[in-house]
Structures are given as structure tokens and as C-alpha cells.
């Protein structure tokens, strides 16, 4: 795991972080934030961004195309993750099904734009890219917490301890 325990204990039973998180107000806020960013970006790229792309320098044209594609891909991954988690929260999908879906839609890391290319982009596109990357980083962290949140396994007795127990029992029987 990642070095710390994300399983919490209440008076009754273990609390599953993933299940409790996707049913929380914090998740609903994250969901709205992510979907708003997707809509905002789509509107920008279809409108104002299209106009701005015609105004960038010749050197920036390729960067604009590449970064807008990366941004779109990143936002598609974010939206997919958010929709899967919401489906789990609403009982439309089990956590096991969500894990299978995770293997289809990778939340992989993305390469940051090259600084010299990034500065050539319109400011609004730069802002959208930075917001999407921050949101992606948060989601990657949450995904690790949710998917690695497993109940603590029962301690397993070591083979040596088992043998010592058998020897103690054998000596007790011989003495008895």
C-alpha cells in the first residue's frame, strides 16, 4: 500500500473509504467541479478558443492543437472516472464492476506541456489546462485511496509459530 491506513473504525464495523467518499458531499462537489470544467472547456474550444487559435503565431499552432487534444483526452478520463464513481454511489454499479471499468479507462499520468510551448498558448487555454491537471492529480490520489482501501486481512500465523504450537501440544500429551 502507500504507507498509511485509509480504513477507519467506527463503533460497529470497518468503514470503507471508497464507499463513504462516493456518497459524501465532498464527492458531489468534486463531481460538479469536474463536469463544469468539462463543459467550460468544450464551450471554450468550440467558440472563443477556435477564434483564438487563428490568432496564435505560426509556431504556436502545432502547440495549440497538441495541447487542446491532450486537454480533451484528460477531461474525458476525468469525466469517465467521475461517472463510474457516481454509478457506484447510486448503486448502479458495484465497486468490483467499477474496478473492471477502471482497467478500460486508464487514469494515466500526463506529460506537462513544454514551458516554451505553453507560454505561446492563449491565456484562457493555459488556465483550463492548469485546472484540469490539478483536478486530475486530486482524482489520481483519490483513486489510489479508493482502490487500495481493503479491509485489513486477519493476521496469519507463521509456519514457525504453527510448528512450535504443535510441539507444545505434543509435549503436553506426552506429559499428561
Image (spheres, rainbow, N blue to C red):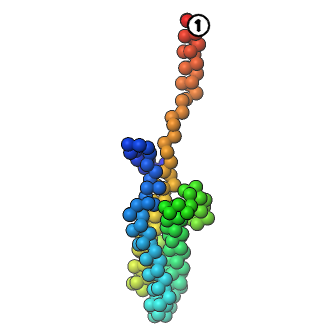
Q: Who's the residue at 58% across and 66% down the image?
A: 105
Picture quadrant of residue 160: top right
Q: Who's the residue at 58% across and 9% down the image?
A: 173
Of residue 18 and residue 40, the one placed in the foreground of this image is 18
Residue 45 on image: x %, y % = 49, 86
Of residue 20 and residue 113, the one placed in the foreground of this image is 20
Residue 133 on image: x %, y % = 44, 71
Q: Who's the residue at 41% across and 43% down the image?
A: 12
- Vertical position of residue 160 compared to residue 98: above or below: above
Q: Is residue 152 visible?
A: yes
Q: Secondary structure at mark 1?
A: helix
- Vertical position of residue 32 compared to residue 124: above or below: above
What residue does disc 1 label?
174
Residue 83 on image: x %, y % = 52, 68
Picture quadrant of residue 26: bottom left
Q: Who's the residue at 51% across and 34% down the image?
A: 155
Quadrant of the drawing holding the C terminus: top right
Please give the count of numbered marks on the rendered protein.
Answer: 1
Of residue 56 and residue 103, the one placed in the foreground of this image is 103
Instruction: Count neighbours of disc 1 (C-alpha within 10 A) and say few if under 14, some if 14 to 19, many if 20 or more.
Output: few
Picture quadrant of residue 103: bottom right
- Vertical position of residue 67 compared to residue 103: above or below: below
Of residue 85 and residue 64, the one placed in the foreground of this image is 85
Q: Is residue 74 visible?
A: no
Residue 101 on image: x %, y % = 59, 62
Amino acid at each position: 500500500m502507500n504507507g498509511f491506513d485509509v480504513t477507519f473504525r467506527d463503533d460497529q464495523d470497518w468503514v470503507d473509504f471508497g464507499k463513504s467518499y462516493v456518497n459524501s458531499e465532498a464527492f458531489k462537489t468534486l463531481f460538479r467541479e469536474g463536469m463544469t470544467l468539462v463543459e467550460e472547456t468544450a464551450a471554450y474550444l468550440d467558440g472563443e478558443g477556435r477564434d483564438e487559435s487563428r490568432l496564435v503565431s505560426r509556431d504556436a499552432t502545432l502547440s495549440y492543437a497538441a495541447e487542446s487534444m491532450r486537454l480533451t483526452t484528460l477531461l474525458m478520463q476525468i469525466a469517465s472516472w467521475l461517472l463510474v464513481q457516481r454509478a457506484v454511489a447510486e448503486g448502479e454499479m458495484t465497486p468490483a464492476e467499477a474496478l473492471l471499468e477502471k482497467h478500460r479507462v486508464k487514469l494515466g499520468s500526463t506529460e506537462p506541456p513544454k514551458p516554451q510551448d505553453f507560454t505561446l498558448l492563449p491565456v484562457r487555454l493555459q488556465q483550463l489546462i492548469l485546472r484540469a491537471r490539478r483536478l486530475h492529480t486530486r482524482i489520481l490520489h483519490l483513486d489510489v485511496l479508493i482502490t487500495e482501501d481493503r479491509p485489513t486481512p486477519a493476521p496469519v500465523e507463521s509456519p514457525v509459530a504453527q510448528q512450535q504450537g504443535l510441539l507444545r501440544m505434543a509435549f503436553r500429551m506426552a506429559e499428561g
